[in-house]
Every structure is written in C-alpha cells, then in structure tokens.
Image (tube, grey):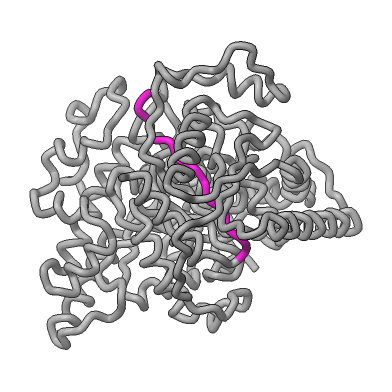
Amino acid sequence: MAAEMPSTADTDWTDIAAKAQTRLRNSIPSEWRIPQNKLPPDDQLDVTDFPAKCGLLTDAELKITESYATEIVGAVAAGEWTAVEVTTAFCKRAAIAHQVTNCLTVVMFDDALKQAKKLDDHFASTGKTVGPLHGLPVSLKDNFNVPGYPSSVGFCAWALEPLRKESTIVGILRDLGAVSYVKTNVPTAMMIAESVNNVYGRTVNPLNRNLTSGGSSGGESALIAMKGSPLGVGTDIGGSLRIPAACTGIFTIRPSFGRYPHFDAGTGMGGQESIASVHGPMARSVADLRLFAENVSNYGPWLKDPKCIPLPYRSIELKPKLKFAVLWDNGMVHPTPPVARALKEVAAKLKANGHEVVDWSADGHAEAMNLMGKLFVADGGQSIRKILEASGEPLRPEMQSYGDSKDLGVYELWQLQKQRTALAKRYLDRWAACEGLDAILSPTTPYAAPKSGDFKTVSYTGVYNILDSSATSFPTGIFADKEKDVYEPGFKAYDDVDEATKNDYDAAAVHGIPVSLQLVGRRLEEEKILAITEKVVQELAL
C-alpha cells in the first residue's frame, strides 16, 4: 500500500504553489542565500563549479562535500570529522545547489543538525558509532515521508500538509546512523521523465542548465551532480532512477521489487501494483551504491515491510571473463549519436579485454512498452485526477494520457497482467537460451541528456520495469562530441517519436555531456549487477 496522503481542499492551487515556494525559500538560512547579482548569469550553463567559487564553503567543507560516501563514514568513524561538521557542509552545499538548479522541495537543516549532534554525543561518550552510516547525510526524493514535513509528490494539494507517519526506509536509514536533511524535486505524480511540476517548477541539469536533469528522481540527480549530497534515495517505476542518473552522469541501481522497503512511500497512484515501483540509491560511485544496498539489506527490512523479501546481502565472485549481450537498438527509438558511439566503444573495449560479446534482439520490447502505457492508465487516470481536483490544479500537458484514458475494468486489467507475466516468462527463457549470459548492455536512454521539455521515450528503461530486472545506469567516461556525433546520411526513423528525437538532437548543445549506459541482470541479482558494473567501469578507465 502507499502512504495515505493529506490534501488541501478548497484552496486554489496557485496560492498553494506560491506559499510552498516561499516556505522553501525562507527555510534556507539567510546567510546561505546568495544575492541575485552573485549568482551565475543565466547564460552560464555549467554551474558545477559554483559551490567552490561562491565563497560560502570553507576549504574543510569543500573537502568534505567532494568526498565519497564511503570515505565520509570512514572519516567520521575514525573521529576525523564530526557528524555536525559533515552535516553542516552538506546543508550549505545543498542550499547552494538549489539556488542554481531548483532541486529541493523540503529543507530539514535544523532537525538534521540536532540529529547529527546526538550522533556526536553518542560517539563521544561510547567511542562507537550507532551504525555503518553514522553521520552520513542522505538526501531523499520528495515522496519519502518524514514526520512534520510535507510530501507533495509534485501535487499542489499535498504541498503544504505536514505528515505524521514516517516511511520505513527513512527510519531504517536513521537507525543505521544516516542523517536526512533535504527532500528533492519530482514531476507531477512522479510520472514524467523530467522533474517539473506546478508547485516548485522545473529542476535543471547542473552540467548544462538548458538540459533536463531527468525524472522522476531529477532533483536527486541534480543535487548529487552538484555534490550537494553524497548519497540519495530515489524511486523507479519506468526508469525514474536510471534516467536522471544518466542525464547527469552519476550511478544508480534499480533493484527488483522486494529488496528494499517501499510500501509506505508517497505515490499518486496508490494501489497500482501491475508495475511495481521500487526505490534505490543514487551516488557518484558503485562503492557508494553498495554501501546503501548492503546495509539496508542486512538491516532486515522484511521485518518492517510486508512486501520485502527476506534476503540479506550476498557476497559475489565474478568469473574472470563475462558474457555480455548488447542491445544496439530497441526497434522503437534509435539511440542518438553520442549514445550509439558510446555503446560501440564500450562493447569493443569489453571484447578486447577478453569478454564474450553477443547481440541481443529487442524481441518483446515493443510489447512491454505497449503494456506499460495501458497499465499506467488502467484506472482511467482517476487516481491522479482526483488529487489534482482537490486544489483545482490543471493536468500538465506531459500527462495528457491520464486525462484521455478510460477505466479498463477488472477483467481487462487481469488480461494485461496475464500478458505481462507471459512476456516475462518468454524473456526469462530467452536469457537462459543465451548460455552463460551475465548481463545485457544497452542504452539507458536514447539521449546523452535532452533539452528541457524534449524527453520523449522511456522505452530503454521501462521494459525492465515490466520484467522487474535488476539494472544499473553508469557513466562510461565517454563524452558527447559535436564533431563525432552526427546522424548518418539516409537515417530512417521508426515512427514519429523517433523522427522527433532526431530533429530535437542538437550536437552542439550536448557537447561535453557524459554518456551513460545501462547494465541489466536477472531478477534479484543486485549484488551481481553491482559487481559487474564496477568491473566494467574499472576496465573502461584503464
């Protein structure tokens, strides 16, 4: 079940949005608010160096915030940094990041510093940490509920109402020693592949503010790319972890359903279980993803979430040489030139390193996406429309299908679910027939990162939500190049979406943007796909 969300009835949505934005702005300490004339000009697209140049962070705070999560917990446990020092540094850097990317929805700095002080007091009196994440600030996607704060999920109706109940993962992270300090922006209902809503507006990509940071965990991806968070928690129902990670060049894993607790996070589609939403970590390294995955799994979340699988973290030893199947193209939308080039170069490098590389067809992918489109609006869009109606908020144009759809009815829904499971069985058999296959290598999206408003397809990620596969997105170390990355003469589009993707492509706009790819394992192979991703990244760096 989803967490029950409050609503603000009989209040105009524009008034709510104005109040929510004012509350957010005022929640940033005045000494951390940067005067307009000191902010980067609008035509400065890359703002990733702004935190180091703006003068708000000390040298010590820069060192802390440029460290990886694994380094931070080690330094705090060794007594080199205090939890208060680390939390203060990330609160300041998150405030800076927000002012140039619009990545936050809720600021919890005061409570975070109180929690950090408790951790320091415990360490001072016992000489021990409270857990493996002791003193680590962790950012949360907006839909994770923290008592006393709202979870808008991108809806005006929910933007001002503080919640009473805590999402299970929030409590688990606190028990492990982590400090929650901010919540991050999402699209309306978390059902758009960019992070834009009528409450807080649009989050932009800090690598190039004309480009999207992706969605629906795009506030997280922008914040982490700005090093305003060492580790964040997002969600994924159609690519919502992997897409924003790819747009900003960071790492993530989409776990299979049941590995991490998720049942009581906020959602605009409560009760929709035909395609399971999951949550997962986002960070700047595979080691930091593993820090989250291992400790949350070993906490025993199945004792708190009725849908969690009792599966502690497993050690994994990979074969020296692996077998990869490459999905060059999904038959619906061609990868844009930077992604197509990265896929070729990574596959060639793996083959040169002695790994077996074979082709993987897109059989079943179009069917999976057709199913996804129907299942998401099986209720006729009623769940989302009812929430919007509470404040009179209009449906965003990106979500028109939720306004046009009709309720399928239980019988038709069951037939779709039957078709989904049959498709998953065929895919499983095809994997088994490719003897010794370790992972599928594919685009995460067709784009390096599209311009804001131009994201048109989740077809490379969504298929693996239908199949409930474990999957990562990782930066390849390859960057878009306006000279190299052009469409071949005679390009033939599959359909209007593919043609529009080609027409939207601007080689100059994405020049220098990191290109990410996706690695896919079988269901519940999180440990293996993390190990494979780490191995691939290490080999690409040589």
Up/down of 406 relative to 342, above or below: below
In the picture provided, is 418 more to the left or to the right than 284? right
Specify the quadrant that holds the C terminus: top left
Q: Nearer the viewer, residue 220 or 511?
A: 511
Residue at the spot x=79%, y=50% of the render? 378
Residue 468: x percent and y percent? 65, 59
Q: Which residue lies furthest to the top in this view?
A: 489
Residue at the spot x=22%, y=30% of the render? 39
In the picture provided, is 207 more to the left or to the right than 34? right
Q: Which of 258 and 115 is in front in this view?
A: 258
Residue 533: x percent and y percent? 44, 54
Residue 541: x percent and y percent? 32, 45
Q: Can residue 98 be seen in this view?
A: yes
In the picture provided, is 458 more to the left or to the right than 287? right
Q: Nearer the viewer, residue 108 or 51?
A: 51
Q: Nearer the viewer, residue 281 or 399?
A: 281
Q: Which residue lies furthest to the bottom in this view?
A: 126
Up/down of 117 relative to 41, above or below: below
Numbered range of the magenta stretch: 511-523
Residue at the spot x=29%, y=29% of the render? 46
Q: Is residue 277 visible?
A: no
Specify the quadrant that holds the N terminus: bottom right
Q: Does the magenta stretch include residue 519?
A: yes
Q: Which residue lies furthest to the left in this view?
A: 59
Up/down of 169 relative to 530, above or below: below
Residue at the spot x=48%, y=75% of the render? 314
Residue 347: x percent and y percent? 50, 40
